[in-house]
Amino acid sequence: MSYAIITGGSKGIGKEIALQLAERGYNLLLVARNSYELQQVKEEIQKKYALEVDYLVLDLAEPGAVNSLYDWVLVKQIDLRILVNNAGYGLVGEFEKYTFEETQKMMQVNMNALVETCYRFYPMLSGKGQAYVLNIASSTAYQAIPLMSVYAASKVFVLNFSRGLFHEWKAKGITVTAVSPGATTTNFNDRANLPAKASKAAKKVTMTPAVVAKLAVDGMFAKKQEVITGLINKLGAFLAWIAPKAISEKVAKGIYE
């Protein structure tokens, strides 16, 4: 049977993607930092579906984490068809507020680990006839965001890396889809230290992880290069594209102050 790997698969969008793929009959390999939450997801899926679900407790910010993931998967000798790079997080505030090590760990998870998983698992995905990579970007990928400068830039990287890889791997039977969610009801805001004003503004356009996950998975199976979830987020990306950068960046800074 076919398998999917999902990083950040213990809660939020990652968990909902796991449920979406389980509904479609995929066995699951889940990766996250919290063993209790991973066990809960495993039990929930196995109660509902006759599928294999296994998990690995791993922090992708740590050196050698992707190698550990690869070695864990390799010994299983599975038929890997889907790689979901969902793990990621943000830091809100002045750039110098955080230690360089804190910023570097975020960059490691959001960019380096994502690229490395694509590289490591390419041999397992290729030659299958059809396989899929789903990379989670963000609505912040469409402009610079003062007070989220590194996070937003990391998601620009994810979006453009994914769009480029889409063309490289399409002829090889691997579709790469970038998904850009906006505000979603996850623990992102807490970990990012999002100010109350920004949280209040986000609530007006917040989507549920289940809705975002369905749009993401449907877009992936439709072999789309890019998916922006929700009309408001699509409009925001369009306005960021046509508006003078100085204006859009000033407005963004006002939200996060």
Image: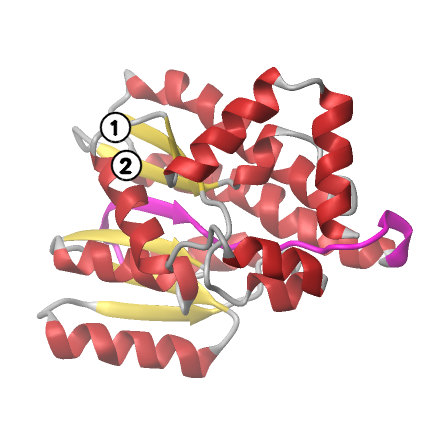
- Quarter the N terminus occupies: bottom left
Q: Secondary structure at mark 2?
A: helix
Q: Residue at x 17, y 75 (%)?
A: 46
Three-letter amino acid code at disc 1?
A: Lys
Write down the residue under mark 1: 223
Write down the residue under mark 2: 220
Seen in the image, is 13 located left or right of residue 87?
Answer: left
Q: Quadrant of residue 53?
A: bottom left
Please provide the residue range marked out in magenta: 76-97
Please give the label number shown on residue 120. none
Q: Secondary structure at mark 1?
A: loop
In the rendered image of this protein, does residue 107 appear above or below residue 143? Answer: below
Q: Position of residue 185 (x, y in %)?
A: 46, 63
Residue 254 in view: yes
Mark 2–mark 1 CB contact (< 8 Å): yes
Residue 194 in view: no
Q: Residue at x 35, y 38 (%)?
A: 133
Q: Position of residue 51 (x, y in %)?
A: 14, 67
Count of numbered marks: 2
Three-letter amino acid code at disc 2?
A: Met
